[in-house]
Image: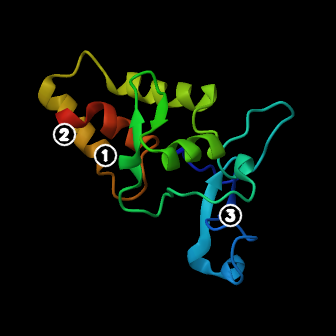
Amino acid sequence: CESSLETDNYHVEHLNPQAARVGDDVDYENFLCSCLKKTGKGAALHCGQKRGDKVLLVNPTQKDCQSHFIYRGDGKIEGKSEDAKSVVSILGLGIPKLNDLRKGVLEAIDDPDLSLDEFKSFLKNYVEKKDTMAPYVSAVESVYGDFL
């Protein structure tokens, strides 16, 4: 989902589910950090908490991962292929909470007080952030990519 990981609210997720292959369960390259360690009653689940043991046919380790999805200015995400659509469903990437978070970042970036050059510079710095991935960067690149 590209949410920021919080120090006390993430967990280790198996990219290939433990039940999918023998030996993957202890392979370091099969581990990813996933948000949402803590859940509350009635909370909408997403990412690793929603996934269960389903296999992702498009995954975040693929170099072209974000090219499989379309992000809208209202924060919504759609899969371009059946495989990507299944990932949106399996991980709950289209739940209102995530749509609202993506929309909030997109709206915050669209500052009318910035000149076009300042806007482009801000976008470039947001997308190319080297020390840590900026939240919802794929949505930002998708919606504002023409400015980069």
**Residue at position x 53%, y 41% from top?**
85
Q: What residue type is labelled 1?
A: Val
Q: Which of marks 1 and 3 is nearer the N terminus?
A: 3
Q: Is residue 92 above or below residue 13?
A: above
Give the image location of residue 7, x and y in percent.
65, 54
**Residue at position x 68%, y 63% from top?**
12
Residues at marks 1 and 3, CA–CA distance in whole angstroms = 25 Å
Q: Please name the residue that numbered disc 2 is placed on.
A: 148
Residue at the right extreme, as displayed: 41
Residues at marks 2 and 1, CA–CA distance in whole angstroms = 9 Å
Q: Which of marks 2 and 3 is nearer the N terminus?
A: 3
Q: In which quarter of the image is the C terminus?
A: top left
Residues at marks 2 and 3, CA–CA distance in whole angstroms = 33 Å
Q: Is residue 132 above or below residue 110?
A: below
In contact (CB < 8 Å): disc 2 and disc 1: yes
**Residue at position x 50%, y 45% from top?**
82
Is 35 situated left or right of 82 in this image? right
Residue at the bottom extreme, as displayed: 23
Q: In this view, does 61 lie above or below 140?
A: below
Q: Which amino acid does label 2 sit on?
A: Leu
In contact (CB < 8 Å): disc 1 and disc 3: no
Q: What element carries label 3?
A: strand
Q: Which of marks 2 and 1 is nearer the N terminus?
A: 1
Q: In which quarter of the image is the N terminus?
A: top right
Is 108 situated left or right of 83 in this image? left
Packing grade of label 3 (10 A; few <14, some 14-19, many >=20) is few
Q: Is mark 2 on a helix, strand or loop?
A: loop
Give the image location of residue 107, x and y in percent.
39, 21
Numbered tag placed on residue 127 in the rendering: 1
Q: Please name the residue that numbered disc 3 is placed on.
A: 12
